[in-house]
Image (tube, rainbow, N blue to C red):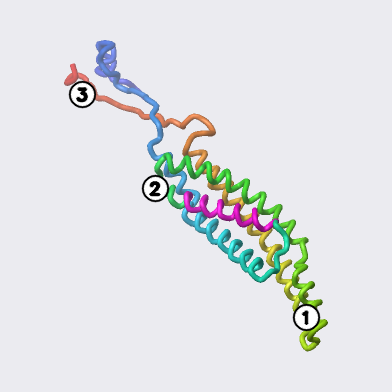
Amino acid sequence: MAVSDETVAVEQGASPAQSPLVAVTFQRNAKRKEKYLEAEPKVLGITQICFSVYMIISLSLFRAKGLSSSGSDIPLLVFSLLVIVAGSVAVAAKNLHLPTLTACLVMQILACVASFLNMIFTIILLGVPSTNCWFNSFERNTVNSTYNYNTICQQVESIHSHFFAGGILIQACLLAISATLAAYCCKVVNCCGAASKMPVITIQSPADQQKEG
């Protein structure tokens, strides 16, 4: 591109205190926090809450009916509560407040660990039979032979196995959601590296420089 003689003259006559015709500076991206919204945190956070509430209600019903004889469901309940808290923080972080985003990052990392451990506990519970049902059926069959409690226990076992098989898929889904939200939070909080900067080009006309002078 050709440069006019007037522009060359202004550049040569400009003192060091004067601003150049073209200035290139690097500034932080003011809209970098909005990248968190690309993860659809409201949808994913509500999904975390709904799945965890479903697991808690179902496990509570198993325990209330005496169909859970193992203590492995207790940490499953506790870790599900942790995932609920993480989902709530993820939804609250939509305000793009930096401390809330930092808290969301911490909670989602904990939710990843909780979901992985819940997956292990769910696999354990999948292989644990509902012994209380069979024990009660033996006692009832000796007293009253009208009802076939063995058939009922077989149906309970089928429900038990199907529920925990589905629970494994739910925990895998929760693990993927937590990892996704944690990754987006990490990009916004800049804990994975320095914040990206955008080049800003400022152009001044010779007339503007003369006014400044």
User: Dot 2 lies on which element?
Assistant: helix
- Judge from the rendering whether residue 96 lies leftward or rightward of residue 4; answer left or right: right
Residues tagged 1 and 2 counted as in contact (Cβ below 8 A): no
The residue that label 2 is drawn on is 95
Image quadrant holding the C terminus, namely: top left
Q: In this orientation, which residue lies closer to the viewer: 146 or 57?
A: 146
Magenta region, main secondary structure: helix
Q: Earlier in the sequence, mark 2 or mark 3?
A: 2
Q: Earlier in the sequence, mark 3 or mark 1?
A: 1
Residue type at mark 1 is Arg
At x 26% / y 11%, what residue is drawn? 15
Q: Earlier in the sequence, mark 1 or mark 2?
A: 2
Q: Which mark is residue 208?
A: 3
Q: Height in image: 151 above or below 31?
A: below
Q: Which residues are magenta?
A: 72-90
Q: In this orientation, which residue lies closer to the viewer: 60 or 181?
A: 60
